[in-house]
Amino acid sequence: MTQPRVLVVNNGTLSLKQLRRRFEDLGSATDVVAATAVPDRVDGRYQAIVLSGTKVRAFDTAYYRPLIDLVMTAPVPVFGICGGMQIIAVSQGAELAEGPQRVGGHQAEVDTDEPLFAFVKPTVTVFHRHTLYLKAAPPGFRSIGRSEHAPVEFLRSDDSRVFGAQAHLEFRDDGREILRGFAQLYQ
């Protein structure tokens, strides 16, 4: 079988190297493009798309229009991490709110009936580095994980193709195991 390929969209994350390494450790090859250079279609070349974190441009839907179009039309699983999830959610009508600054490991409760969480317990410890949070899941999505500070720590589209995590899953063991659950969706 051919090695699966993941298109990693770099939205300015500080941890691109770690994110790529996670997917490569899970058996996927990765290619990286900037958010402004995404292809119009994946054309069978990629089995999944991952959006990295970003600084503060999630509100700029005009800037991210080509990326949003790709995410919402690609016939492959998509995972938005931190700012990547926020870009997806805001483009679909969600609102972001300022919250407490969180840096380091924080606990979240996850819906273990979701395939994404096949390799973790109901309470996970994931790495955060941000102050913006989703107030609620946008139309066509639902929260599949929550914490004391955020009602939407994890997000899934109603068609089970687009996922999001407020946390940086490229860090910590539970993050790796959640990415393993995502990899099971396309491998």
Image (tube, rainbow, N blue to C red):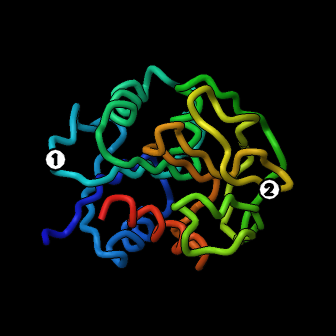
* Residue of label 1: 44
Seen in the picture, residue 165 relative to 172 is either above or below; the reply is: above
The answer to whether mark 2 and mark 1 are in CB contact below 8 A is no
Kind of element beneath mark 1:
loop
Q: Quadrant of the C terminus?
A: bottom left
For badge 1, the amino acid type reads: Gly
Residue that protrudes farthest toward the front in the picture: 113
Residue at (27% x, 62% y) in the render: 30
* Residue of label 2: 147
Q: Quadrant of residue 175?
A: bottom right
Residue at (37% x, 69% y) in the render: 23
Mark 1: few/some/many CA within 10 Å (<14, 14-19, 20+): few
Residue at (64% x, 39% y) in the render: 142
Decide which of tag 2 and tag 1 comes sooner along the chain. Answer: 1
Q: Nearer the viewer, residue 120 or 152?
A: 120
For badge 2, the amino acid type reads: Ser
Q: Position of residue 77 (x, y in %)?
A: 37, 49
Seen in the picture, residue 38 relative to 15 is either above or below; the reply is: above
Kind of element beneath mark 2:
loop
Q: Position of residue 156 (x, y in %)?
A: 56, 45
The CA distance from mark 2 to mark 1 is 36 Å
Q: Quadrant of the N terminus?
A: bottom left
